[in-house]
Amino acid sequence: MDRYSSYKDSGVEWVGKIPSHWINSRLKHVSEIVTGNTPPTKDEDNYEGGEFLWVKPNEINGLIPTNDTKQKLTIKGRSLSRVLPPFSVLVNGIGRIGVFGFSELPVSTNQQINSIVFNDKVDNRYGIFHVSMMKEGFLSNSEKVVVPILNKTKQENLEFILPPLSEQQQIVSFLDDKTQKIDSLIQQKEKKIELLKEKRTSLINHVVTKGLNPNVEMKDSGVEWIGEIPSHWSVLPVGYFGDVTLGKMLTNEDKGGYSLKPYLRSKNIQIGKVYIEDIKEMWFSDSELDKLRLHDGDLLFNEGGDVGRTCIWKNELPECYIQNSVNRVRFKEDNQYYFLYLSTLYHSIGYYDSIVNRVSIPHLTKEKLESVRFLRPPKEEQQQIVEYLDKQTEEIDTLIQLEQKKIDTLKEYRQSLISEVVTGKIKVV
């Protein structure tokens, strides 16, 4: 790649040197920063039946345009918002600082987003590419409070590299071509990952409902969505062969002789794993400690919200208990890992969601869970199924990880290329 004939120090550590004839400006000189707002949510007329895009931070997608939103504004709601022109850059200013996106359409945003509306000194597409490399600048200028915040004033004063407009347009033409080719490769890898995941799911679903012997005699399971199962398998409510226990209500104070202990709540029960990065503590009596302490191999079910997420406790902590948003199932004879595979199938097809008690949010109560009919092969066959699926899914997961590494490498290369071109390390004009 060519380089420019001469360079100068930009004065910005994360930018380094830039071509001598480029200008080191600031965002406030090349754009207007617009902080979004939220039209009153109590007034349904601002949202109900709306058609105007209203963007929240979880809807901004980097270099992929946000051309649709989950929630929209009506004409009335839009009149109370701050409408941005197409190709404004949307920057998350609270929490995940520096996450950015844009839309090809006029949009409004909520107050967590500080949008950059470029003036006629900047080609909008160049501006988007430029912002994609500014995360370090956004982070270093954010206020480190409970939740990181990038305020409007500090954002306005961030440095902006300004080539002549004609060169900006040539840079855009070059980067559009290169990034589209890279993105095409990424999409191919993502499609391959989706196919591998579908293969993994199909394999599990078949084996946990049909077994490993293709020649075995079959019978009707009595469950419409499962169909036939091996004739020697049983179909029983889980409460018949497993001990189901619901955790305890949150107790915030010592009621006399209580012990302060860590516990799992709904958030900690993820599909196939326990999330232990955010563990809370509460007070337990001696009898509650005996009843609710987790043992290695306990099968755990999320009780509320996205009901039926299932995982197995593997002594991730030396000692832990459960709150009443978690059901524990403990088996005496059966293989809990077979039922983890089976329960993951039940969750994925929405079976738990179809049977739960509903008030404001769904609840998979202890009684409901006890009545769920599980397929139950003989114990020896459960073990064979688990060993087979562990091996097969590990091979598929390895392929998925390899494809994901390729995607990560392509994304890193794409971002490196953008940074090199936007700061003039590579000459494309």
Image (spheres, rainbow, N blue to C red):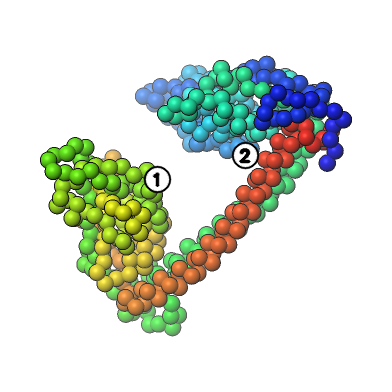
Q: Amino acid at mark 2?
A: Ile
In the displayed structure image, the side of residue 271 where residue 29 appears, left or right:
right
Name the residue that disc number 1 marks: 277
| Residue ID at (41%, 70%) | 386
Q: Nearer the viewer, residue 279 or 361?
A: 279
Q: Give the number of the disc on residue 353.
A: none
The crowd level at tag 1 (other Cα within 10 Å; few <14, some 14-19, many 20+) is few
Kind of element beneath mark 2: loop
In the image: residue 408, left or right of residue 298: right
Q: Is residue 404 visible?
A: yes
393 relative to 45, above or below: below
Q: Position of residue 108 (x, y in %)?
A: 53, 25
Q: Residue furthest right?
A: 5
Q: Nearer the viewer, mark 1 or mark 2?
A: 1
Query: Dividing the picture into quarters, in which one does residue 267 lie?
Result: top left
- Choose between 353 and 323: the one closer to the eye: 323
Residue marked by disc 2: 64
Q: Are marks 1 and 2 in contact (CB under 8 Å)?
A: no
